[in-house]
Each structure stands twice: as C-alpha cells, then as structure tokens.
Amino acid sequence: MVLTSVPFAEDVFTWPSDNPQLIGCRCPECKAVFFPMQPSCGVCGSLEVEQLLLPTTGTIWAWTTQEFLPKAPYAGGETPETFKGFGVGVIDLEGVVRIESRLTESDPDKLKFGGKVELVIVPFRTEGDKEIVSFAFKPV
Amino acid sequence: MRDVVVLGVGLHPFGRFGAKSAIDMGADAIRLALGDAGITWKDVQFAFGGSFEVDNPDAVLGRVGRTGIPFMDVYNGCATAATALEMTADGIRSGKYDIGVAVGMDKHSSGAFTSDPVHYGAPSWYGEAGLFLTTKFFGMKMNRYMHDFGISHQTLARVAAKNYANGVLNPNAFRRKALSEEQILESPMLNYPLRHYMFCTPDEGAAAVVLCSAEVAKRYTTDPIFLRATALRTRLAGAYEVHSSSALIEDQPAPTVFASRAAYETAGIGPEDVDVVQLQDTDSGAEIIHMAENGFCKDGEQEQMLADGDTKIGGRIPVNTDGGLIANGEPIGASGLRQIHELVRQLRGQAGERQIPGNPKVGYSQLYGAPGTAGVSIISR
Ligand SMILES: [Zn+2]
C-alpha cells in the first residue's frame, strides 16, 4: 500500500514541495515576525500582517526533552508502552524569528546550544492509507 | 491611597482529600482566616475568590453565609491568588471598603496541567504536536539558564531536597517525606534537566486572607502586618514564555522582573531588606531562576548560595520555608495565598518548627506561570 502524505495541519508548512518551508508572517509596520500565521501583529496590533516563508535552517537557542507521554490534545497516537521521548527546541531561524519545534534528536549528549539544524518533514502518525506528516528540526 | 493590613490568614491543608469539594476547602480556609483575624463573616464587606477548576468560587457563600456582599470570581493563571489579593487590597486602598477577604481554592486531578491551546491564542496543532506543555517550557528555560550561568544538576537537587525537608516540618504540606539529593537525581527525567522529584504537582487545597484598612486594624491588633505592595505583570513582546510558538529574536526579561521592580518601588525597599521569601518553585529550576529575577542574587550566584545553604531555614535568605510548591503542590487558586499565610506565620513568630530566627520583619512572595503572568506581594511589620 502506498501512503499519501498529508500535513498534520493546514498553513503550517508549504506542502507538497521539494523544499518545504514554514509559513510565518511579518508585520509591515513594525517588522515583527511570528510563527505560525496570525491575524494581527503581537507587537503593535496592526491588522496588515503579511505571509512570510521562513528560513529552513537555524541554530538551537534552547532545548529540552519530552520524556513522558503528553495528555490530550497530544495526537501522536502512541501509548505509554510505545511512547519514545522526543527533543524540543527553540530555533533561531537565521535571525528572523525564534520558533518552537520538535527535534529529531533527543539525546542530551547530541544536542548543543548554538548547534546548526535544518527543517525536515517527518512522519507523525498513520491514519488508514494516509501518512500524517509534521515538521521537525534535525541537527546537521 | 490607604495602607492595608493583613489581619488574618487561614489555610486548608494542601494534598488529596477524596470527595471533599474545593468549595468546602475554601469555606474552611475562610473560617480559619476569620478566626485568626478575630472577626465574623458578617464583618466582611466584599470578597474575591480565585480558582481554576471552580467556575464560581462565590458558591462558598452558601457555606459561610449569603450576606449579599459583592463577591468577585477571578482566574488569572498561576497568578490567580496574587490577583485576588491585589483586587481585594485595591478595594481597601481606594477607600471603597474597610474589610475584605481574598480566598483561593482548587481541586486538580494529578499529572501536568493541560487545556485547549486555542484558548491561549495558539493553534490546535501546537497541542497535537506535543508542544503545549508547561513543564517543557520550564525544562527549556532552565537548561538554557544552566548553560549560560553555570548551574549544576546537583544544585537543582539541592533546591528540591531543601523544599522536601521544609515540608517535613509543615503539618499542612502535601509531601512530608525528606528526599536525598541522590534520590532526586535518580528519579526519572521528565524534561531535561528536570526530573520527577524536581517538579511540583497539581493537587487540592485552599487558603484565605482577611485584609482591612490600617485604621480598622487598630481595633483588632497592636502589632499589624502591612501589605506594603502588590504588583502584577504580563510578558512583553519578544519574551520566550510558556506556550510561545514563536518569539522575536531579541529576548526580553520575564514578567517577574518587572513585577518585582514595581513592588520594591511601591514598598520603598530593596531585596536586601527582605527577611523571608516565597518563590514560585513549579520546579527546582524555577526557584533558582526566580531568586535572580526577584533581585536576591545575580545570575549564577545560586550555585554557591545553595552549596552554602543560604536559602535554608536559618540561612542568610530563607526561601520557601513551608516547602513551597514542591512540597505543597499547586492548587492554582490557593497557591499564592498559601505563600502569604506562611509569610505571616513567620513574621508573627508562629511558624513552629520551621520558624526562622532573628525576628523577621519583611516577607516577599512571587508567583509565575502560564501564559506568562507574574505577581509579587510584599508584607512587613
Ligand atoms: Zn507590528
């Protein structure tokens, strides 16, 4: 069976795409950048925010691990038996904005402050013949 | 603005209480606070009630007396109790009322808090992806803090061990068993660098305070404890805070820093004048960071301070003498009023086995939590 890849949410990253990018927004008034898109600027309140495709590389500003199974609304589909911890980071995307993301690496010995990472689209869970995909950052 | 006195404090123990409702715990706390103040419910002109789980804390009126007074329900994240306290104080400061009650109550199920991220202005997928977790935020913030300022895992364990040890001395605490630093460091990692025994847990409990004007207080006491300052602040644009899916590149100080500065300014004192401290120790890392954010040390000095026992009962600047959130757990609506209860007990010399020496005169309390809200209160004799 061939699985079709479906993004876990609309308007989070460009898909399908050979070079997927996260979809953020920028306020033309004060230049503040946010992720994901939001209807108004969180700094000055302007309603004129414009879509901005974000850089696909960055550095780890902060990181931690998620080692217990989150309660709902978490929808990773694991059980306490199958759950494996994952890494989480705040990524500085080339000085444009800092965003929160899951990391593909969760070993504290392999995660470094300032370490370079890149955006990857990864399988999240399976629903029938659909593979639900989400985004993560991978150390490079 | 008129001076406000903390006339009475009451605390329902924190922990797990079977079928007992949050409302009934709140009523118990109010009765204890009234008895401590030497007044009756009929003397109370208005009240604020804080809770996360209870929609209408004013249902407590059905237990203590439906006297028809204005009773306002408040919820303001982890700063709920500081908010109830400030609103009650403002009612007296302004001259509108002379005697009021702030009460907080909650009854949470166990395990990390959760909610709908959409109610926090975050997208649904933020929760579905496993990012909508307060504990993860605290892990992230502390991990970076350790990296920047050289705080060790041992120091994280020292904070938790201190708070469990203080809990042993507190009959109202939830956790009353001492844990060694080794036991804490061997407990499972939840969010690196924070381990199971370094976190507080949501639980049950209630606390209440009676506030009155300085003039009215003269009828009841010759040694009043004044509420010198209350301050609430929210996060600035740019700050990386709980439930931030993104943050501006330029980081900003946490809201606690601004609430703390405002409270010191109003009280006309500085951190060097404080004798006993209550800080939001959602986890032991949070207590370490909050020591600096509230001005009790410079970033990084906590490493030596904890090694020297400075924040223990009997230390230079005791922190969380009743065991803090780590030993008491966090019934959100009540947590900040528990802090005030402990400070009042310490200032009156009524803290029993956990009494700090030296006749303390100034107490300081701080709350911080989702979605990036802080509250600071200062009391003194
Ligand atoms: Zn703007």
Image: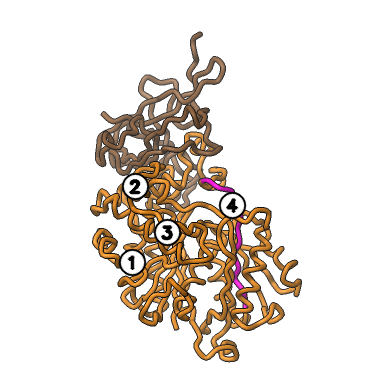
In the depicted structure, whether residue B377 falls above or below residue B191 = below
Can you tell which of label 1 and label 3 is closer to the viewer? 3
Q: Is B355 placed above or below B74 here?
A: below
User: Label 3 amino acid?
Assistant: Tyr
Q: Disc 1 vs disc 3: Cβ atoms closer than 8 Å?
A: no
Do the residues marked 3 and 2 share a common chain? yes
Q: CA distance from mark 2 to mark 4?
A: 27 Å
Magenta-tinted stretch: B100-111
* Label 1, label 4: how far apart the Cα atoms are: 29 Å
Q: Nearer the viewer, residue B188 or B146?
A: B188
Amino acid type of the residue tagged 4 in the rendering: His
Q: Which chain is orange?
A: B
**Residue hosting label 3:** B164
Give the residue type at disc 2.
Leu
Q: Chain of mark 3?
A: B
Mark 2 belongs to chain: B
Instruction: Tell me if the residue at label 4 has its CB under 8 Å from ligand 1.
Output: no
Mark seen at residue B285: none
